[in-house]
Amino acid sequence: NTPVANQSTNKIWKLMEKYLPNTKEAIQSSVVNHVEYTLAKTRFDFTLLHCYQAVSHSVRDRLIEAFNDTYQYFNNKDVKYVYYLSLEYLIGRCLQNALVNLELEGQYKEAMLDMGYNLESVYEQEVDPALGNGGLGRLAACFLDSMATLNYPAWGYGLRYSYGIFRQQIKDGYQVEVPDYWLDRGNPWEIERLDVNFQIKFYGSVTKKVEDGKERTIWEGSEIIVARAYDNPVPGYNTFNTINLRLWRSLPSSEFDFKSFNQGDYFKALESRQRAEFITSVLYPNDSTYAGKELRLKQQYLLVSATIQDAIRRFKKKRKEWKEWPKYNALQLNDTHPALAIVELMRILTDIEGLEYEEAWELVYNSFAYTNHTILPEALEKWGVDLLGNLLPRHLEIIYNINHIFLEKISRKYPNDWRKLSALSLVEEGTHKTIRMANLSIVGSHAVNGVAALHSQLLTSTLFKDFYELRPTKFQNKTNGVTPRRWIRCANPGLSALLNDVVGSDDWILDMDILKNFQKIADDPAIQNRWMQVKRQNKEKLYWWVKERCGVDLNIDSLFDIQVKRIHEYKRQLMNILYVIRRYLDIKKTPAEERRKLFVPRSIMFGGKAAPGYITAKRIIRLVNAVSQKVNNDQEIGDLLKVVFLPNYNVSNAQVIIPASELSQHISTAGLEASGTSNMKFVMNGCLIIGTMDGANVEIAEEVGEENMFIFGARVEQVEEQRNKMRNSNYRDYFGPRLTEVCDAISNDLFGYKYDLEALLDTIRNKNDYYILGADFESYCEAQQRVDNLYRNKSEWTKKSILNSLRSGKFSSDRTIRQYAEEIWDLEPCEIPNPSKSEKER
Ligand code: 4GP
């Protein structure tokens, strides 16, 4: 008779109550254990990569202790959860962030140094998990950090793509996309949950049955796959709380395709198994554009269905009554990508749980909320009813039903107002009938928010005006934020140390607003000097980065002027590079001996990926590289002007680029950048912004003062007027002589690549200048002149740099997350008692 352990008295659990100690010796022994037992390495084939893996495993052990305790605690306290649903998470590298948040960086540094390893170079071994495109995905990652730090009971849910956003290489000045198989060296951070699997159905048919006088709807899917959970612990800072980012991976289900197997069609059966795995294989590389592909819809549904099933399972374990659902669950939609969650929950509640429609709708409506991230029309998701109805026939029925009931209410409120009815409808009629996912998200949510004050205001006055008039209280603003842990503490250790000295503690990491109390230091010459030293060290780091990757030798004393973000016409990288050409022509026209008097030496850097199918964006990269080649090799110019395209902009590169930047460009056409979040990171790192009154720039100006930025260009209410002006004039008059001369220089083949570059210019000439680059160009040049003037005065520049940083507290994602929790989720923090240091070190 083998003994069977009793769950409560089992010695396993007793033994597990001990925490790993964090002494130097204990850290070393846990690293060494992983070298020997996890990696099975010997001295003969041990590399720095293995060292990174062993260190990560040892940190992961510590994360898991906190992670398990956290959810155990939440469960015991029976808390309300927020579920953050996002198709993208740009989490960036984990090791340093985990060490900083666990407050173990110092200990690990020492332990590793003692064994002959420099922790910094160990960090560099990590791949940068890039399961997102840009702002939306990075925001989700910052939010997780803040949710953990502020002790909110939260779950992040997403997809574990095998291929993240492509790696960008520059070949002959063109962008080349290389697949990013980021898992090829394994991923020490994730925990594969072999026992957390949910079935996901696609296609099939819907039938109605009458049972006990009640009609029941049954959807029988004809393709069944499995979503498996991969957990990624997200540690909070200065707290033991560690939350979970649960990513789903698609796998074939075991019952799958028995028929083919039984009929002996072995290979056909295997092929369909591979099709299942393919669903989560690749992230769609589009930023702010709707893809419209069936595979993408499958991805969306897989995330949604697995997540809702998981949440329901958790809720049911507590044997709650359905009416309590909204009291215990808040679900946040990161854009419309996971909007089917609304429909999926409706389906389960009505078809499976047997709730009445109205009853179910109450629960759905009161638990869901939706964040919009852009008003660009090309981003608005509209799924064709043919595609949706084929893949998810029951969901289409439910959407029609939601729409029917909704429109009935509308027509009672606004009889015969056909315009309103068709604007509000979830269905867009036409030759190709589609479902409007934004309308679905608004109708199914109790709160809808934009991501900066201006953007939220534009949502209610333009894009969602009719919805706003219907229910104004539903609409809110939640200005974005970024985490100071990654963006100051990890990315800029020099500045962190300086701020610690200024404040007298590191309290600012959790309360950025206290920095405001130290504004006096901005005038202090000693602080200014230290501030400049920190900036110089960061510039040196970027100098080497650029030299190694781009082969360009920058002058470290030149002004580092940077625009890094996805390449988009509305972000106007084109205006930036046209100005660079203007500057180049002006320098050339100036007698050699006067050049240094008139022009501040500048290193102008661009970085960002273009969506693979976005030809204009790719041509912008081509132009930047063409200009770079010409200018950097012009002996006459020397270090007065250098132009560099920084390849493969991603989170880890941003951590080097942003702290080194002195001027950063956020120059979108007013009204088109919903918020921007890198603008916040730059400001925190003491960088001055040249920018338009767009997105969060408006609030940054309110906080740091317009006099500490370089604001230019048309305001949102002037944009349409400028477009009309363009329509009614010749581009030469509209552009003015300075921009015209630049365009002519390109046309006259000064930079080569005539075919591409002419096509690029045609996007702004000939009455096409939708992004009013021509209208804003002069004002942009003037702002650039102000930049030069100020940069000559080091002390004044540094003072403004300091003020930018000290006044940036509003843009911590901690502030944003508190607002979501209080104003949308109705969520209370729940902090698990931190096992005392002594207990930890037992
Ligand atoms: C971005 C917006 O373009 C950016 O302004 C905003 O800061 C960010 O979301 C986070 O809210 N949108 C996207 C997207 O990334 O894919 O629509």
Image: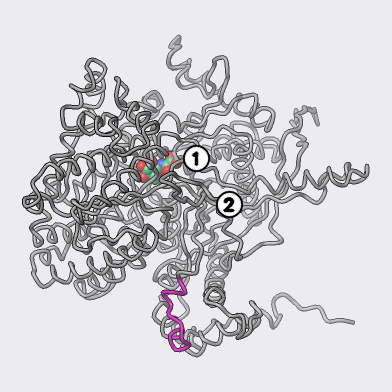
Q: Residue at x 11, y 48 (%)?
A: 707
Q: Residue at x 34, y 37 (%)?
A: 752
Q: Residues within 10 Å of mark 1 (few under 14, many from 20)?
A: some
In the rendered image, the residue lying farthest to the top is 416
- The residue nearer to you, when weighing 461 against 482, is 482
- In the picture of the structure, the residue carrying the numbered disc 1 is 612
Q: Is residue 417 above or below residue 380?
A: above
- The residue nearer to you, when weighing 695 against 575, is 575
Q: Is residue 328 visible?
A: no
- In the picture of the structure, the residue carrying the numbered disc 2 is 163
Residue 715 image point, x, y percent: 21, 32
Dot 2 falls on a residue whose secondary structure is loop
- The amino acid at mark 2 is Tyr
**Quadrant of the snapshot with the N terminus:** bottom right
Q: Quadrant of residue 556?
A: bottom left
Q: Is residue 517 above or below residue 448?
A: below
Residue 207 image point, x, y percent: 78, 28
Q: From which residue to which does the magenta span run?
A: 111-123
Q: Is residue 762 above or below residue 337?
A: above
Q: Residues within 10 Å of mark 2 (few under 14, many from 20)?
A: some
